[in-house]
Amino acid sequence: MRNLLIILFLFLLLTSLFAEEELVKKQPLKAAALSCLIPGGGQLYNRKFVKSGLVFAVEGSLIGLAAYHHLEAENSYDKYKVNPELNSDYYNEYVKYYEKRQSDFFWIGTVIFLSAIDAFVDAHLFDFQDKKKKIHLKFEDNTVGLVYNF
């Protein structure tokens, strides 16, 4: 039942992302928050589908790798606990997988942080092309002018 509610929540969240019109200004904090909560969610909100898939793949891979290293560390520690004097190799193996898992957590946090920054900046620059069309530099008679069209 709980899994069904989570899937329903994610479905409603994703459908609400696509319900917005193209001309609506994006909210940078919403994009960053979505990127922190859902792998690639902020990029999906900003309509950057390739980036979203890339972020989803990287975060998913790192989470899977962290889970694998966690399970291997637990298995090694359980084998070590059976007979600590004879199984010192299992303790060394536990330490190795523990350090790899900690490294995975660092990289997961780094990717989430960078994807949130990327989503934040992309939301700010969402209507940049429209604004760029309104401003023109004008070069006349050895002077430079700025023309802004309303």
Image (spheres, rainbow, N blue to C red):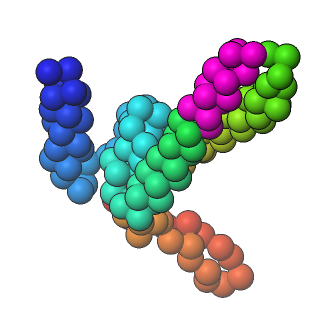
Q: Is residue 76 magenta?
A: yes
Task: Pinpoint residue 22: horizontal percent, then vertical percent.
Answer: 23, 56
- Quadrant location of the C terminus? bottom left
Q: Is residue 139 above or below residue 136?
A: below
Q: Is residue 11 above or below residue 135?
A: above
- The front one of 46 and 50 is 50
Image side of residue 130 versus residue 132, left or right: left
**In the picture, residue 41 is in which quadrant?**
top left
Image side of residue 18 versus residue 30, left or right: left
x 33%, y 47%: residue: 45
- The front one of 4 and 90 is 90
Task: Pinpoint residue 34: horizontal percent, then vertical percent.
Answer: 39, 36
**In the picture, residue 69 is in which quadrant?**
top right
x 33%, y 57%: residue: 47
Q: Which is the main secondary structure of the residues drawn in magenta?
A: helix
Task: Pinpoint residue 84: horizontal percent, then vertical percent.
Answer: 79, 16
x 25%, y 54%: residue: 23
- Quadrant location of the N terminus? top left
Task: Pinpoint residue 94: horizontal percent, then vertical percent.
Answer: 74, 29
- The front one of 100 and 114 is 100
Q: Is residue 119 visible?
A: no
x 61%, y 81%: residue: 139
Q: Is residue 109 above or below residue 43?
A: above
**In the picture, residue 146 is in which quadrant?**
bottom right
- The front one of 14 and 76 is 76
Q: Is residue 144 magenta?
A: no
Q: Which residues are magenta?
A: 69-83
Q: Is residue 58 visible?
A: yes
Q: Is residue 20 above or below residue 104?
A: below
